Every structure is written in structure tokens, then in C-alpha cells.
Image (cartoon, coloured by chain):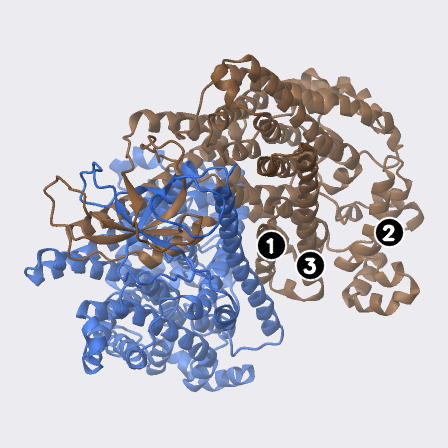
Chain colours: A brown, B blue
Amino acid sequence: MNLLGYLSLLCYLVVICRGSGTDIALDAKATLLHRIDSLNLLIYTCLLTLTVLTIWVFKHRRVSWLHETGLAVIYGLIVGAIIRYAGSTNAVTYLDAHPEPDAKYNLSVPPDMIRFHFPDTIHIPSGEVPILNKTYAYSFRGEIVKVEQNEIDLKATFDPEIFFNIILPPIIFHAGYCLKRKYFFRNLGAILTFAMVGTALSALVIGALMYGCVQLMPASLASSFTFLDTLYFGALISPTDPLTVLAIFSQLKVDVNLYAMIFGESVLNDAVALVLSGAIQNYEKRYSNDGGFEITAFLGAIGDFIGIFSLSLLVGAFIGCLTALMTKFTHVREWPLLESALFVLMSYAAFLIAEVCELTGVVAVLFCGICQAHYTYNNLSSDSRNRTKQLFELLNFLAENFIFTYIGVSMFTFPKHHFDPWFIIAGFITSTLGRAVNIYPLSFLLNLGRKPPIPMNFQHMLFFSGLRGAMSFALAIRNTVSEARQAMLTTTSLIVIATVVLQGGAATHALAYLRIPTGEGQNDENEALPYRDVRSETSRADGGSEKARLAKLWGAVDSRLLKPLLTHARPPLTETLPTFMSPVARWLTTTHQYTQGCLFNYKFVVPEEDSGLARNQDNSLRRADSDSDLCINEPQPVPTSIDPQQMWPGLVDTRISVEGITGSNI
Amino acid sequence: MNLLGYLSLLCYLVVICRGSGTDIALDAKATLLHRIDSLNLLIYTCLLTLTVLTIWVFKHRRVSWLHETGLAVIYGLIVGAIIRYAGSTNAVTYLDAHPEPDAKYNLSVPPDMIRFHFPDTIHIPSGEVPILNKTYAYSFRGEIVKVEQNEIDLKATFDPEIFFNIILPPIIFHAGYCLKRKYFFRNLGAILTFAMVGTALSALVIGALMYGCVQLMPASLASSFTFLDTLYFGALISPTDPLTVLAIFSQLKVDVNLYAMIFGESVLNDAVALVLSGAIQNYEKRYSNDGGFEITAFLGAIGDFIGIFSLSLLVGAFIGCLTALMTKFTHVREWPLLESALFVLMSYAAFLIAEVCELTGVVAVLFCGICQAHYTYNNLSSDSRNRTKQLFELLNFLAENFIFTYIGVSMFTFPKHHFDPWFIIAGFITSTLGRAVNIYPLSFLLNLGRKPPIPMNFQHMLFFSGLRGAMSFALAIRNTVSEARQAMLTTTSLIVIATVVLQGGAATHALAYLRIPTGEGQNDENEALPYRDVRSETSRADGGSEKARLAKLWGAVDSRLLKPLLTHARPPLTETLPTFMSPVARWLTTTHQYTQGCLFNYKFVVPEEDSGLARNQDNSLRRADSDSDLCINEPQPVPTSIDPQQMWPGLVDTRISVEGITGSNI
């Protein structure tokens, strides 16, 4: 967003060219820059178009060994190589300058702008048109570390902050908005363990192992890496992005719980890794500041991590709930365009508010997306549901493919790469080990307390789904000042490319090899009916023994307080709140909520004591479940009449028949 | 797009702060800047949210005297005033600098970047932490005209180029994509006359009158305006933006031909004014360059205008047709997400290609939108139709309301306003006169050749619909270097605000006062069926005597060559092309096109010689017309069995019954 500040400055100082050769030359230069920028964007637009067309061909011909993201990376690599070796270099012109000796200035910080007198005393040999001695404005950029580094290659690269402010928010919001909440909450314990504990553990293990490896390397590299550097590398390489795997999962209708664990973990560990890397950088600052006791800085970093993560979460959730209230208590749903605009604006506001408060906007946007899907979505008109769903689906598609294309192109055009074969090999090995440390020990611990344990082949699949993606790359390219950071960027880029192309391509085979059941059930209809009685879910929540105590508590609060408050769902607050609150409850319940509920009960006559069976008989009621997925085709759950404790073993028994299906798809 | 270049530079030079007080201070400053930028965006997001909620209240309570754009302007003014008078100023720090005397530099242009040694020789009195003598990078901004102008207020303002590169393209594309082509082409002569001749005439008249007025003003102002300046003012104030009026038109179902003329003119005159103002600026450069014969420069400017306009048009149309071909000859429609992505990417590519070729991207995007709607839309799957329609509707809504909010806010916060009461008064009077000169004489001339003449009350309404809007403001704020340009910006802002709020609010009354027929027909269903036989239209085109020769020729080419080539429409090329072309024709005709056509004929059995009646009998067939509008509820045309020559007089006869309807709505 810094760009806005700089650009605003620009508009004040720019001048029309008239009357002088210098001005004409400047004007031509500005036009050229604009054209180069447009050309860069055009290159990416064409690459994305090409990717879209090739994806179509692949889908048409049922090619499954290369996912669209892998394709985007490969096209990016090809075009990057062409740009690198075919294009010309446009060097940036430099000049040294000194402040006016008698200037009045009383700050220790260098000024925002300098007024530069040119050509002043220097002699310019070229026989150009006479140059007046003019004053030009120059704005602050940053410190120059290596003064001799003059030539800067600007070809087809963008500011890394663009990823955090423009590309990642829609991707992350979409992930939150699409989260299959039913299975997400059912596997909440495992997901949180893998995402929170697992990511931290993985970062620590990778950081320690890399530090050890670096010490064994040639001295030049060893001296440039601190432990914090390798820890930062651990944090940035830990988040997974199993897009390719998930696409194959939903195509082959793989077990929903496995899907939920992999998807849920990848959504959350992006947020965790982002906040974690921020905390490591803050630690760096604190530590370098006082130079004293490290424990204080370490506790400070942990405090940072917890504080920023939970506050960002709260901001996002608050904005999500506020949107739900707005859409519940106004009749804005009668004008779907206004409603959609409100939805988009509020979601964007969550990002901005978090950024203004120095929190992490991306995390806020994730939890805002989850709340929007859980509450607001139920209040929206069907037109707005479609519109928001399709809008974010499209934005997500474009943003994702852009970032993978960029990973490919920047491999060749980004000037701050540092190829160090030892570091790259160590990176590949330790990132694999980090993933293993995340999955296997934690699965073992989880299985101690978990009623349907995570079977071994699911653990292998979780390990295999550890593809690296957008978040790792964005974190790596954010900071490329030192040689260590540049080596990290190169290694991260290579890991992302290798995992996306190779692991992604092998996912179908891995499924077959690991004998993961596929082809379960039918596609669910993606729509949720506007209203439903959540009492049926409450009763199920009480009955389902696989739910943890925390999840049960949350379920009760959600269905008794939050859903009746934030949506038109039944039972209304007048029934769930204690009697002394009834005036408030009546005030917070819409007429709609009373009548809609009655109509609903009237229509379906749900026997509440046996909702499980009623649900199976009445398919429309099932679809009325607001927890049903929004975006992804999801296999139906095993009927609830089967004992949930036996769910997974039961599925594993169907192995043989399932293998056939998988085999025929390969 | 310059922002990308600057930001890319930024990322190379930014440094992590460690080890020094200066660095910590710099880091804090960068964080602060980022927060201020986020805060600015947040202010606009909240303003838009507020506007959305108030629009809902207004629609809910059926308030018609204030349109959403008027509301956005008013909210903007209020918040702008609060920011201006409540906030603190953060001044930009400045320092003078000179180049190193012995520097080697052989260009006449100032360098892109300077390496600034700080603090070097200057003495800093504050007792801060010891400062090392470091080197910082500063990048080029522009020439400083007034050296004493140090304090720059950055509050809630953006670079004007953002309007041309981000805000206007979706608005203009949407306008093109929504154009009701049937009525647009039927009134093509009038629309082109008003938009091309009228805008140029209006610019010239306003320019000349303003120049005269300025000469009568105090000497300080008179000397700062050249004739080219006032001509530029004429060009920027001429385009109309009758959003408010059109919203009321579609609400009250006003005559479609009047609607088409006002909408069509406003869409095209934006493009004309943009290219015209560019040509005037180029003229300025040419003239100032050689200082010689003015006629050469004048002819050059006219050549510029025609060349840039028609080339931009061709680029846009070409990309639109290319998209149509892609969607026709691939089966990408089976994957609507890919199809929508392709559509969006191609439309954006039209903008970028035009910008890369130094043409006008906005104009290209307009004609790309028209072609997308005319051809590509027919090939899209229904999911993609909905998605693209809703996407651009939403983008247009947000962009439009943003720009009007910004007009309000910038009235107070933009630092380059220059209030000159005489210039403002003159501006209001001449812009009204300019609109009159555009409408009345040209209507008179048009009526000489036009079969159903434009009645006087329609002319008054055309005159009344001359609201100024987004394009005028964007052109005015693009360049605020001289005092003359600043006075223009202030006057333009005030004219936009006054016309949008006052004229927009009075539009319903004006309709009633001018006895314009309202409440015509029923809403058309907005959907077009996928395929249709265009032969029926061809026959109607031949029969309708209101069509000009040019329009007839175009209609024949369109229905015999372009539509069969670019869409799945019947008759296929095998029937329309001469026999020696039949191999090519067969190659360019899809199986789909043959079978679909047969199916269609089989279903509806259209007697081709009497398509007019058949259309009225079979409503589904009418909806199959690909010329039906996409976005706006449109009154049905008068049945074609009535002689089109008597269409308007016939409508005027219904005056009395219609007035009642209007009255009851006020």
C-alpha cells in the first residue's frame, strides 16, 4: 500500500513538458516506463490466458498428471528464460550527491525528499540542447548496502508487498469462505495440532537442521547465516499448499475427513507461518536492540505470535459477525447488488483494519471468510450467494495462477537469486524431514486420544500432501537483502516448483499405492437452503462421540447463541436464552425468524428426537444444513445411522472395490 | 502502472533494520506510511459501506430525489471536511542536495536514482544515537516548480493515474458490455453525431467562450491561461455522465430510443473527450517544439485524434472478436470458471495492448466490451454469462461510487485546489451553453434527414441529461501543475457535484414537466438464449426504413459474415458466403452451428418471410435475440407491426395517461 503514498507524491511534483529538450526527454522516459509496466502486465495476462487454454485442453483430454498450477509454473519458467536470454537490459542511471553544507536540518533520519540541483557543477559532455540548472525532486527509497550494485534489471518483476496486499488476501479469503465447516469442526483437534504445533515444530526442526548443515558448508556461506536466518527459513518453508492434491481428491471423491484435515491444515498453517515469521523478525529486532538476555526476547516473540494471531483472528471474526448482523437486520437482500457490494466491502475492511492496527491482514481475512460462510452466507439472497461465490472463485483462480506463473518467471528474471547447490540440497532434505516431524509424531499423539484413529495410509498421504506454494514463496521473496536471504529465495522457489510439478503429478498414483478409498458417495448439491432448524444439529453434536469437549462447547454456543443471533436460523434466541433476557432476545429476533421457522417445521415436520433418521429420509432437509460446503464438490458423509466410531475402519474395509475405481482413473 | 516500476525498485533497495537508531526510526517510518495508506483505503471502504447502507434505506423508503452517486458525493464532502479540519498534518521533510562535482555522467536527463550521502557534512543538533555516514537511494519524481512549496498534505488522496488505469476501465467496459445494441444501432446516426461532432463542437465553444471570459478577468488569472488551456477545459468538461438520469429512466421505463441516445452518447463521448484532450496536449508539445506554423500542428492534432481513436477501436474490437473465436472453436464452455477467466483476461489484455502501443486503453476496452457483448456473449455458457455480467456489474458499482466519493473527499483534502469565483461562474455558464450547442443545432440538422424526428421535449431532456461525471474529474485532476489547471480542477469538481446532486435530483420532475412518456411496456427478461437464426433480423433490417444506409450495410456484414463466423448463430457461413469460398466456410462452421440451427428451426418453425409477427407470437424467440440487453431492465419496443415511422408521434399521443403514472411516482 506504500505505493499509494509514493504515487500521491508523484502527482504533486510531475510537470508538463514544454520548451526544453530535457523535458521532452523526461516525458519520453516516463512514457517508456509506463509502456514497460503495461508490457510486463501484458506478459502475465498472456501467460495466464495460455494457461487457461492449456488447462482446458488437459481437462478435455482427461490428463491428470499435471495440475493447472504445475502448468502455470512451467509456462512461467519457459517465458522467464526467454525474457532473460532474449531481452535487452535497461540500466538505471545513477549519480552521487551530497547535502548542501549549510542546510538546516535537525533530524537524525534522512529526509523524505531531496531537492536535487542538476546539472549544477558537473560537466556533461554530450552536445545536447542547452540545459537550464533545474531542481528535481527525489524521494526516499532505502539504504544502499553495496554501492557498486548499479545495474538493476526491472524485467517482469513486481514488488513483493503486492503479494501480501493484493494476491494473497483473495486466495486466503476464498479458502476460508470454502472451508467445509462440518468436517473441519469434526476434525478440529487434528487440524489445530498439525497447523499450530506441527508448523512450529517443523519450523524449529528445519531451522536447527539447516543451521547444522550450514556449519558444515564452505566458510563464506556459513558465516552469512545466523540461527535466526535458518529459523526464518524453517518458518517460511513449513506452510503447505496442497492445491494439486486437493483438486485430485475432489475429482476422485476421496474420504472427506482426510480432505478436511489436509485442506484445514493448509489453510491454517499459512496464517501460522506468516505470523511466526513476523515474530522471528521482531525477535531479531529486539535481540539486536538490547543485546542482553535472550530469554526476554524469546518470550517477547512468543507473546508477539500469540497476541498478533489472536487479535487478527478477533478482528476478522468481528467483521464477519458484523456483516451477518447487517444482512440479518436490514432488508438489503432485496437488492442483491447492494448486498454483494456490502459483503465485499466489509471483507476488505477486515483486511484493512487489521493492517491499520499493525496486525496481520491475511489472518484477519481468513477468519472473516470463515465467519462470512458460517453466518452471513445464510442471510444472503440466492443471487448474492452465487455472485460472491463466483466472484471469489474467479479471483482465487486468477490470483493463484498468477503467483505460480510468477514463481516460474522470477526464477529467471528476478535478479536476487543465489544458487548454492549445498544449501539447495540441504533445503530439500530438511523440508521433507520437517514435514515428517509434523505428521508422524503428532499423529501418534493424536491417536492416543482420538476415537477413530488416523490410519497409517492417511498419515502417509498427509505427509505426501506437503507441497509448498504461494505463502512460502511470498515470504521468501519479501526480503532478499543479504546473500543468506537470496539463497533462501532460490531454494524455496526450487522446492515449490519441484513439489508442485512432481508431487502434484504423482498424487493420483500415491492415492492408489496407499490404498486410500476413493469414489465415495455422490456429489452434494452445493446450495444451502436459506433457513433451517439447528436444534437437530445440536442433538447430533451431543450424540457424536468423536467430538471433543471443546468442539461440543463451541457447538452449543454456536447453535444456541451465535446462529440465532447472527442468522435467521431456528431456534430463535427467545427459546435459547434464559428468561430474564427475554426482552433483549425478542428485540434481536426477526419476524422472519419466527415465521420462517414455523413454515419450515410445518413443511418437513422434523421429529426432533430422531433427527438423524429424519435427515436421511428427507434429502431437502439435509441440504438445508448451513454447514454444507459452498465451493467444492464433496462426497456425502457416511449415513449417521452407522456408528461414527467405526467410520474409518469401515471405509478401509471397502479397499478392494475402491482400488478398482482408482485404477481405472489412472 | 508506473507504480510497478517504482515498487520494484523499492524492493531491491530496502534494508532490514538492525543495529542502529536511524534504522529503527526508518523502519518505524515505513510502518507508519503503510498504516496511513491502509487507513486511507479504510476511510473509502467505510464511506462506500455507508453509501451502500444509505442507498438501501433510500430504496426501501422509495426516495427518488437523490441517486447513489449524489449520496456518495455528499458523504465524501462531509468526510473530506472532517479530515481537513480535524486531522493533523504530516509534513514531508526536505533537504537540498548537489551532485558530486567530479561525478562521471554523460546524459542531459537527470538520473533515475541518486546515491545520497547523509549526514555527510551537515551538522545535526539533536542528541540522537551516533549516526554513521551512510548512503541512501532516492528515486526520481519530477521537476520542482516552486521550490518553497515544502509541505505536502498526503491525506486521503491518490495518484490521478489510478483513475485511468484502475477505476475507469471497468466502468467503461461495463458500459460497452451493457449497451443495448438494438436501439444503439437504430439510433447510431444521432448518437455518433452527438458524441463525435457534438463533443468537439462543445469543446471548441466552451474553450473559445472561456478564453473570452478569462480575458475580462483580473490580469493575474488572464495571463496564466492560454487558449490551449481553455480548450483543454472545454474538452474535459464536455463528456456527460448521466448515471442518475439513466437510473431514473430505467426505473420509470422511459422511451427506449431516448434512453439509447443518452446512454450511447455518454458512453462514446467519454472516449472522444479522452482522445481529444490527449490530442490537445500533443498539439501543445508540437507547437512549443518548433514554434513555427500552427496549421501543421493543428493538422497533426487532428491526425492524432483520428489515428488514436480508430486504432484503439480496432485493437479493442480485434480482441473482442478473438475472444469470440476462442469461445466458439474450443469447448471451454464446459468449464465455466475457465471460460470466465479467459473472458476477463482477454478483456484486460485489450486495455494493456492499447497502452503498450501508446493508444488509449480506455477506448479499446469500450469497443472490446461492445464486441464481447455482441459476439462472445452468445457463445458463453449460462454460468459464465451470469458470472461475467455480475462481476462487471459489481466492479462498475464499486468503481463508480468510489470515484464520486473521491470527488467529494478531494474537494477538501486535495491540496491543489484554486478557488477563483469568476472562473467558476464562467465555467458553469459556458458548460451549460456548450451542452446547448451540442444538442439543439445538431438535433435540428439530424431532423432534416431523420425519418422519425427527435421531438422538442426529447431535445430538452437530452440537454437536461448533460450531467458531468467521472471522466471530466479524472481528466481535470490528472494535471494540476499550473494555477490555471488548478482553477480548472476546482471548477470541474464543483460542476460535477452540482450537476450530479441538483440535476440528478430534479430528473424525475424534469421528465414530468417535459411530458416524456414513461411506464412503457414490461421488463424484458435479461437473458439471451444461446442460439438464434439471424436471418429474421436481416429481413427486418432491410425492411426498417429508419435505418441509415451505413447501418444497413453494417447489419448485412454483421449478420452474413461476422455473426456466423464468430458465434454459433444461423445461417452458417456455408450459406452466406459465395460458393468458391465453401471449403473455408465449412471449416469455419461448427457442427454445433448446423445442428443447433436445425433444432431451433424445428422447435419454433419460424416463417422467415413474416418474422416480425412470428416474433410477437413467440416470446421465447424474442428472447433468443442476441441483441437484447444484458444489464438494464428495458421497456419492450413498440411492436414492429406498427409502422416504425409513426413510432414516436404515437408515443407522444399517450402523454396524458403517462403523466398520471409519473405523477404518482413523484
Gap in angstroms between the C-alphas marked 2 and 3: 24 Å
Looking at the picture, tell me which residue is in the foreground, A421 or B467.
A421
Name the residue tied to disc 1.
A353
Question: Which residue does the numbered mark 3 point to in the structure image?
Answer: A322
Counting other residues with Cα less than 10 Å from the Cα at mark 1, is it few (<14), some (14-19), or many (20 or more)? many
Judging by the rendered image, the residue that carries numbered circle 2 is: A535
Tell me the chain of label 2: A
Mark sitting earlier along the chain (1/3)? 3
The kind of residue tagged 1 is Ile
Viewer-nearest of discs 1 and 2: 1
Point 46% across, 39% down: residue: B592
Question: B324 above or below B79?
Answer: above
Q: Residue furthest left?
A: B293
Q: Which amino acid, mark 3? A: Leu
Q: Give the residue at the far right of this rendering.
A: A609
B176 to A72, vertically: above or below: below
Disc 1/disc 2 C-alpha distance (Å): 35 Å
